Image (tube, helix red, strand yellow):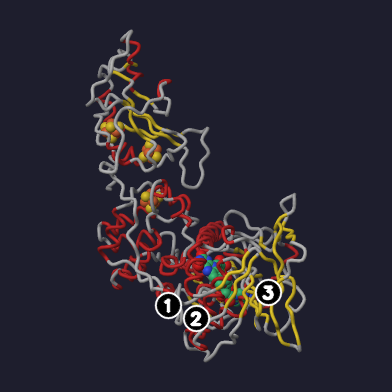
Amino acid sequence: MKKQVSAFKPLRLLKYLFKKPLTQPMEDIFETPREASDNYRGFHVNDWEKCIGCTTCAEICPTDAIIMVDREELEETDGNFAKRPTIDYGRCCFCALCVDICTTGSLGMSKEYLHNSPNGDDYYLMPTETFLGKEARDGYQKDEDSDLLELERVSMVHLSDVERKDNFLEIIKGYSKAQAIHEAARCVECGICTKTCPAHMNIPEYIKAIWEDDFADAVNQIYKTNPVPGVCGRICTHNCETACSLTQRGEAIAIRWLKRYIVDNAPKDIYERVVLEQVSEKRDGKIAIVGSGPAGLAAAYYLTTMGYHTDVFEAKPEAGGAMRYAAPKYRLPDEAVDQDISFMTKIGVNIHTNTKVDAKMLAKFKKEYDVVFTGTGFFEGRKIPMPGHDHENVVAAMDFLPIARDYTRGKVDTLDVHENIVVIGGGNVAFDVARTAVRYQNEKFGKSNVIVTALETEDALPADLEEIVEGREEGANYFFGTGPQEIVIENEKIKGLSVKTVESIFDAEGNFKPSFVEGSEQLLEATQIFMAIGQAPDYDYLKDIEKDMTFNRGKIEVKENGQVVGVDWLFAGGDIISGPDIISGVANGHAAAIGIDEYLSKK
Ligand SMILES: Cc1cc2nc3c(=O)[nH]c(=O)nc-3n(C[C@H](O)[C@H](O)[C@H](O)COP(=O)(O)OP(=O)(O)OC[C@H]3O[C@@H](n4cnc5c(N)ncnc54)[C@H](O)[C@@H]3O)c2cc1C
Ligand code: SF4
Ligand code: SF4
Ligand code: SF4
């Protein structure tokens, strides 16, 4: 649906100023209420409980009769604007397009009213469900045929479980042009998603550009707030889709896949031209960036486009952080990361790999650069300190996944994966470990045996549903609602993981304090245990300045502009301040770039 906003909209109101209005409740006119005629559509009613203030009704109205009004008493939440439509019946032509397009179905019509009043104010109304005290929906209502929304998403081609369980091929194939344009046409351009996206991406704008087949505009809109769209088009946590107004009655727009369509299909010359056009003239100012995850790269990208000199220092052999070394290849192929990073280097970001920054180097950066930005992430593996956890075959997720990524890119020949494995954890990382191990076992042994165990029951797992479903399809076994007690070791070999059934996970005050059913011990047999219970930061390089900083549950406290509280030459972003997800890292890397620019301008 095309949005038509006219700059003359307010002026057009004037022509109604001297029109004589004519509306009045029926009962005020007739002692005995009269039946309305069949073809009378009626006046609007709107169920405020259902309405999300998405403005779609106002956008479609051909007579500009609908004006959205802010309502302070409403709480503005993800997927809900605190505004509701008002209707000017001096202009409404009763076409009911607003009812037919209403995303939530909250808008309908009631026949309770008749056009007959000398008072102009009677014609400017904010419909509620009990409009003028009446509760009736006996006027025009939309039905399946008149509904203007297409509620089903254009389906995506996935590899089947048989096609994918013994290899690391990318599972999702991506939209064709026709599919992408069809999917883009479902968007009502309400912008509710933009508010929910941590980077506030121009989502309706780039979706519209797809619909218009305008790749240059699509790339331009994306790069305003996100310089790693190839990655995000595949594995972003897509909070925007959860908030999409179409979820009220149907399936969210496939925002993430539409972004991927642009990145994968925009002609390279157009893409490069648009990205290079973003760079301003050179200006004074050198910034050192520690860590090349999404936060570091976003900070580097936006600072470079502002004209600053940026040097990124990365401990690993390749740039990209968790995008390069954690998320498995079947979800995020190297080419997507490579493409995003190639545009950064093209605009002049200098990336120095194999360079682990320590406290001495940081002190040097302070002298040699105007500002330092750090985005070193939560990159260290963690283990539960239970009996047996220090056995060599008990492996933390982040001690395994980076090597598994290197295996899939042919940099190591083999992986240390046993035939019988237990994975502890119920989040997405646990499924990354389990699904990687299943693939490797099938490839190496021709069969798989991986058990995933977590405290939560399946319906309460923190992992995404698609991970749980696809993991099961590939052959992972689940043993949820149980808590690990000890790693049972006999003759120095792991025999398995002893677990007990969970009674409760939190105590009466809501603190994390799991309790277990007495006598419910069971042994999950395995010779190798993986722990995916969260990652940790390595702040060793900050040891000389950490006394001036504030840490809150392992995260560094920063001001709104990303400046570290207590150390004004240091800015920070990514998992060490928020998240954990890629788009939050991108958002605060970008915010820090703006903060650094302001800081340097004042200096
Ligand atoms: C297995 C796994 C799967 C994930 N899947 C997803 C997903 O599907 N979607 C999503 O949105 N998020 C996902 N995440 C989370 C996401 O990857 C992180 O939130 C995000 O990458 C954090 O970005 P960051 O900028 O903080 O840096 P990180 O990506 O954590 O990178 C930090 C970088 O800093 C480098 N570094 C650290 N210390 C130093 C030092 N002293 N000197 C130099 N370099 C240093 C590290 O080597 C690393 O390259 C996943 C995380 C993991 C672990
Ligand atoms: S019925 Fe038609 S003219 Fe009236 S408010 Fe709705 S869309 Fe606008
Ligand atoms: S389209 Fe429906 S949900 Fe959206 S603002 Fe209008 S009445 Fe509310
Ligand atoms: S993607 Fe959904 S929420 Fe975003 S503008 Fe389109 S319809 Fe609205």
Q: Position of residue 338 (x, y in %)?
A: 43, 77
- Please identify the quarter of the rendering in which residue 388 is found: bottom right
Q: CA distance from mark 3 to mark 1?
A: 41 Å
Q: Earlier in the sequence, mark 1 or mark 2?
A: 1
Please report contact status of discs 2 and 3: CB closer than 8 Å, yes or no: no
Quickly name the residue at label 2: 439
Q: Nearer the viewer, residue 328 or 418?
A: 418
Residue 387, compared with residue 133, is above or below; it is below
Q: Residue furthest left?
A: 39
The residue that appears at 27% across and 59% down in the rendered structure is 181
Q: Residue furthest front?
A: 519
Is 45 on the left-hand or right-hand side of 575?
left
Amino acid of disc 2: Arg
Label 2 CB sits under 8 Å from any ligand 1 atom: no
Query: Callout 2 environment at 10 Å: few (<14), some (14 to 19), or many (20+)?
Result: many
Please report contact status of discs 1 and 2: CB closer than 8 Å, yes or no: yes
Q: CA distance from mark 1 to mark 2?
A: 8 Å
In terms of secondary structure, where does tag 1 sit? helix
Please report contact status of discs 3 and 1: CB closer than 8 Å, yes or no: no
**Res 164 label:** 1
Q: Nearer the viewer, mark 3 or mark 1?
A: 1
Label 3 CB sits under 8 Å from any ligand 1 atom: yes
Q: Ligand 1 is located in which of the four quadrants?
A: bottom right
Quickly name the residue at label 3: 541
